[in-house]
Structure formats: C-alpha cells, structure tokens
Amino acid sequence: MPLFSSGPSVDSVISRLGSTKDSTAHYIAVSEYVESKKRRGKGVAEVNTKLDDLERALAKVSERLAADTAGTFAKIRDDKGLPRSKLFPSAAAPAPEVAPPPAYPAYAAPPPPVPAAPVRVGSVSRAAAPPSPPTTYAAAPAPAAPSYAAVAPPARAGSPAALILNGEEQLAMLRDYDTVFLVDDSGSMAGSLWREARAAIQGVVAHAIKYDEDGIDIYFLNDRSAAKGVKSVGEVEALFNRVRPSGATPTGARLDKLLKEYKRELDAAYEAGKRSGGDMYTVKPLNLLVITDGAPTDDPESAIVSFAKYLDKYDFPLSQCGIQMFQIGSDPEATEALQDLDDALENRYNIRDIVDTVPYAGAMTAEMIVKVLLGGINRRLDRRNA
C-alpha cells in the first residue's frame, strides 16, 4: 500500500487526496490496513506515526472538499460498515425548526455531533467511537458491554493511557509496589528471542513506570549492567542496546541475591518496629518479574522456598512479595519447569504461593499486560490461565 510503504509527507498526501474519489479510496484503505495490523499485533509504532501524518493531511483536504462530499462519505461508511472517524465526519442533518411532537415530551433535542477519537492500535484496546447523533426524537441507546478501553492520558509524558475494566483502573495496585525486572541474557536468548524480549518488556514497562514514582529497576542474569529508577521506555531501549546475550541461565543465583537484598530491608524494618513498638511492616512490597526463555541451569526453587518460609515465619502480609515468571518463546521443557514453580511449591513445602507463570504470545494485549504485571501479586490473576 503506497500510503504506508513510502512514508509520505503531509504535503505529498494532500496532493494525492485532491478529490472526493481519492479521499474515499484512502479512507477505506487506511481502515482496512489498521484493522489488519491490529489483528497481527505488528507495526504498531509505524501505524500510529502514519496515522498522525494522514490525520493532519486529511484535515487540510476536508477544508477544500465541496460540501456535497459529506453525503458520499456517509453512504460509503454505512454501506461498508466502517467506523465513524473525525477524519471524514458525516454532516448531520439539520434539526427541524419545529417543536418536538407532543407524543414524545420526555426527549430533549438531539445533541450536536461529537467527533470520534482517531483510530489507534497498540497494547491498549481501542476506545469505541461515539455513535452517530440522532436526527429524530428517539430513546437513548443501551449502554455498551464493559471492556478494556483507553482513558485520558496520564500526567507522565510518553506513558500510555490507563487500562480500565468496569470503571476500575486495573493496574492501580502497582502504586503500592516496587517493580523490578530480572532479564535472562543467556546465550539461548540471542537473535529473535532477544528482540521479542525487548518488545515485550517495552510494552510492559510503558505501563509499569506510570505507577512506580521512583521508577522501576532492571537487572540481568549474566551482564552486570543494571538500570535503577527507570522512568521511560527510551532508557530500556538504551540498556538493551548495550547488553549482548551470552552464558548460562543462573536464574536461581540471581533470584537468591535479589531476594536476600530485599530480606535485609525487611529485617531492618522489622527490628526497628519491635524496638519502638511501632509498625514492623513498613517496607514497600516487591513485584519481581523474571523474563526468560529456558529452564534454569541452577536451582531457583530453593531460593523461592527459602524466602517464602521467611515471610511466613515473621508473618509478613501475603502481598509482601510476588514473582512473575514471564516465558519468552515456547520451549516445552522451560514451560514445564516454570509451571512447576507456579503450581507445585505451595503444597510441596507448605508455604505461601508467591509465584505465577505466563507465556509470551507474541503481542502485548491489554489482558496480557494486566496478567504479567499483576499475576505474581494477585492470587485471583495467578489462578487465571494466560
């Protein structure tokens, strides 16, 4: 499709949309292109960039199109079942200059047309465009079924909109946690899996940084590069550009080190609380996400069990720590090993369940983001299949 493959400027798009016929063809092509990209979950950044250019171009084109083209677009939209768009709004029929019929005294005059939000694709589901304003006095439409949708952009620049379900912000509980990523940079991650890991982490980080005021932390299994207080996706990109996958998969050793560092913080707060007679549970809970493609070459089970027993011994809140094992790729042995950490440890050792596992399906949907970020700290999501 020339419109997207060549990356035209605004002016060049305008020159190609000088007639109603050309504008109509591009409108149909853009709608179908966006839907196909959304289904495949690929080319998200490219599509959004091109849509920005197209939106500006079409805004200029619409100023010089004749008024009678509005009826043409409305007919095309209705015939093809295309969504409303502010790029080509259909002209609303003028309200009759007569009083409402006596038989319908309860209905007010129809509101003016409201432009729909521009189409966007990405990890957050697209908000539904508002319905066409009524041209006659009719009952209000029934409310739509609840679904994930984008809401107003958050205060932090560059961060995606919040995920909303049934009027609730799904990731709000992350504000109470420190979010830490532990990334597998073993040799088996080189190539396409490393690119998949980078894309998956960027999709998750874009949401996580919105809720962690002091930023997230990122560590690797082998490379000693680390980033603390990350507050932008660009920092993640720069970090991945510096690290080259190599070596084994010492998941257990790195987990043990991170959990022991966190345990020292808990010990200090617990002892201080005992001495003062105050709150002994003041350390911010930990949400630890492990991104890996394969079965570990050491023993993460022992590190997890030891830390869970410690939490139980001192009666820390059940929400004090959660570990999410996020699998990149589809190695069946890795899947089995990670699933065992999720399902078997609680009964095998009579400990609290602090582990969840989720496989990466190749695209970060809204539901996947919620599962990845909350599965380790929310038992209801832990029990839900990915």
Image (tube, helix red, strand yellow):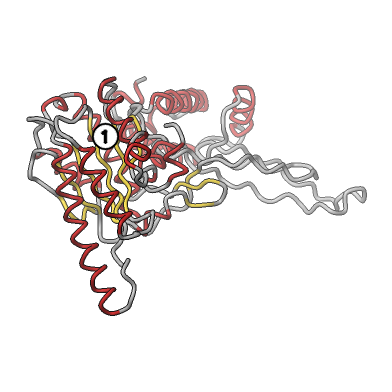
Q: Nearer the viewer, residue 119 or 229?
A: 229
Please, is residue 28 above or below residue 146 in the view?
Answer: above
Q: Residue at x 92, y 51 (%)?
A: 102
Give amino acid for label 1.
Ala
Q: Quadrant location of residue 312?
A: bottom left
Q: Nearer the viewer, residue 190 or 17?
A: 190
Q: Residue at x 51, y 26 (%)?
A: 24
Q: Quadrant location of residue 276?
A: bottom left
Q: Is residue 24 visible?
A: yes
Q: Which part of the image, by quadrant, shows the C terminus?
A: top left
Q: Is residue 158 visible?
A: no
Q: Nearer the viewer, residue 23 or 372?
A: 372
Residue 302 locus on image (x, y percent): 21, 40
Question: Is 197 situated left or right of 83 in this image?
Answer: left
The residue that label 1 is drawn on is: 199
Residue 101 locus on image (x, y percent): 89, 48
Question: Is 98 situated left or right of 189 in this image?
Answer: right
Residue 32 locus on image (x, y percent): 47, 23
